Image (spheres, coloured by chain):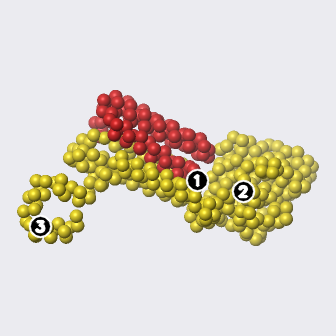
Chain colours: A red, B yellow
Amino acid sequence: MMENIKEHIIEYMVLFVAMTGFICLLMIFRYNKLALLGVSGIGSVFYILWGIIHHAIRKRLTRTIAYEYILFGILVFLLLFTVLSF
Amino acid sequence: MPFNLFRKKIQENPTIIKYWRKNPKSIEKYQFIYHFLPHPKTKRRASLISNKAIFLYCSLIILIAVAFRIIPKFAPGVLGYASNINIKDLLEYTNKKRGDTGLSDLRLNAKLTAAAQAKAADMFKDGYWSHVAPDGAEPWDFILGQNYDYIYAGENLAKNFSTSKEVVEAWFKSPSHKSNLLGANYDEVGFAVVNGVMNGYETTLVVQMFGRPRQPSMVASVYEEKNVLEGQKSETLVAPVQGSQTSAAEEPAKVAIAPASPKVDVTIATKSISLAFGGFVGSLLAVDLFYSKKKGINKLTGQTFAHLFILLVVIAGIWFVLKPGIVL
């Protein structure tokens, strides 16, 4: 795992910085549900794109892997949406 | 396959073990463990975090969210938002925020409190959540309806919050509400904290009305403020139900200030569902990461570490950051 992270340090740094920004935006807009839904949507789409680009760069992108990132992106959005929509 | 069945088969035919060793696929369907662990031969994740399983979890979450929208239509008041908000704390936190910025304290005014109660009762009666009622009545109409002659007036609304502090914090974080909260043109304030059923959900509406009387001598005294607070404590606690409330003009003093406690607290339920699904998938991803490294399984899948990382970020966000409540 660590070897994999070291090998793709820039991609993981991008993900880490984006997720830190994501948490910061959640805190900034914590009382604005509409903005939070927008932030959640953008975060999910970012993750899907990150995953696809990450595998495309390594020439390991398959349809199954693309579906996997799309499904995980949808899952994290739904986890946030369930809490935010009520 | 249950253990006893294995033992029975071995007793019946001792050579079967050799057969199983040579043909592991024949008992693969009984290998329950691979629902939780990555498979060393197929080089796939545990079946409970396969693409099909994630699709199933997404579908289940959508179904639960839809059910939470439908239930209130058939059983109003079953779902709701538990709260413990009171006027004394709202006044205290409001004046603390003003004090922090060097502004004078607001006095609790009986007429503004009655106007706020009338507005809250009207919102439950007509089932709306807005500064302007469906019949066009504006906040000023409720204030003037209580014979409060003002030169400046304002209104803040909040619903679905759990505590008084959260309500004031939410107003403070919103620029338009903050300008009311810290308005130098206001001398007095009135609050209403009313429990009831809105759109099928049991909730607590909070109305905050600000004002400056035309005559400075009309500003409420400490004695009047104390009377209003005492009056709130001694009121009969009546939880208004949609469509069955008495109008505020007829009975403006009857306000429910008891803690709201619905049968199912939507805030806790939705948080629990999200954390349960997120925690379950996250745990299996963590096991996958550990087991794959230990057994040297090089899977042909997406990055487990990245999935786990984003799930942990989302779980942390849900647990620590996201709070219920809307301000208007």
Residue at image coords 20%, 47%: B41
Compute the Cα span from label 2 to label 1: 17 Å
Residues indicated by labels 1 and 3 sit on the same polypeptide chain:
no
Reading the image, the residue beneath label 1 is: A86
Answer whether residue B230 is visible to the viewer in this image.
no
The numbered disc on residue B10 is 3
The numbered disc on residue B127 is 2
Q: Quadrant of the N terminus of chain B?
A: bottom left
Q: Indicate the chain on which mark 1 is placed.
A: A
Image: B75 above or below B96: below
Q: Amino acid at mark 1?
A: Phe
Q: Amino acid at mark 3?
A: Ile
Q: Indicate the chain on which mark 2 is placed.
A: B
Circles 2 and 1, Cβ within 8 Å, touching? The answer is: no
Instruction: Identify the secondary structure beneath mark 3.
Output: helix
Residue at image coords 35%, 30%: A56
Image: B43 above or below B83: above
Residues indicated by labels 2 and 1 sit on the same polypeptide chain:
no
Which quadrant holds residue B245? Answer: bottom right
Q: Residues within 10 Å of mark 3 (few under 14, many from 20)?
A: few
Compute the Cα span from label 3 to label 2: 70 Å
Q: Residues within 10 Å of mark 2 (few under 14, many from 20)?
A: some
Instruction: Identify the secondary structure beneath mark 2.
Output: loop
